[in-house]
Amino acid sequence: MLKDLFDGKVAEALEQLPQEFRDKMQNVEVLVKDFADPETIRSVGVESKWGLLGLYVGIPLTEQSFFMVGLLPERIFLYRRPIMRAAGGTHNLSIAIKEVLVHELGHHFGFDDGQLEAMTEIDD
C-alpha cells in the first residue's frame, strides 16, 4: 500500500514540474527503488543505506553534444524507504519527493551539489 502511495506521489511530482523542465526530460527515466545497492552507496561515499535519497546517473545536459548519438537514457533514482524516513510520515511525503526529484533533476541540468544547495538556501 505504501509503495502505491509513494509511486502515485512521484507521478504527481513529475506532472507538476514546469513544462520546460519536462521537455528537457525526454531521455530521462525516473526509477523508484527501496534502497540504493551497496556498490552505489559505497561509490558516492554514503555511510548508510538510509543516507542516499536519490541519485542522478547520466551526462548532464551542459556536457552533452549534438555529436553524441545512441546515448542510454539518463536515470534519476528515487530511494523510497530513505525518502519516507526523511519525510517523517505520509503528510510530508509529497514535499520530500519533490525536493529529491528537483535536486536530482538539477544534476541533469548541470548543477553540482554546492550550486543546488546555494539555490535552495533560505535567507533568515
Image (cartoon, rainbow, N blue to C red):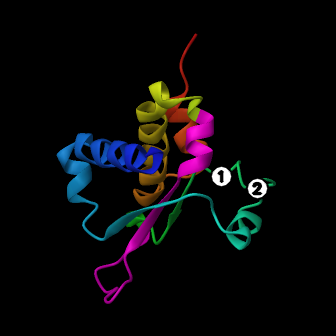
Is residue 122 within the magenta segment? Answer: no
To which quarter of the image does residue 70 belong?
bottom left
* Residue at left offset 43%, top offset 68%: 75
Residue 53 horizontal/vertical position (percent): 59, 49
- Residue placed furthest toward the front: 1
* Residue at left offset 47%, top offset 34%: 93
Mark 2–mark 1 CB contact (< 8 Å): yes
Mark 2 crowdedness (10 Å alpha carbons): few <14, some 14-19, many ≥20: few
* Residue at left offset 56%, top offset 52%: 112
Disc ID at residue 46: 2
Looking at the image, residue 119 sits to the left or right of residue 71; the answer is: right
**In the figure, 55 relative to 96: above or below?**
below
Q: Secondary structure at mark 1?
A: loop
Q: Which residue is mark 1?
A: 52
**Viewer-side residue, 124 vs 57:** 57
**Viewer-side residue, 111 vs 7:** 7
Q: Which residues are magenta?
A: 63-86
Q: Amino acid at mark 2?
A: Val
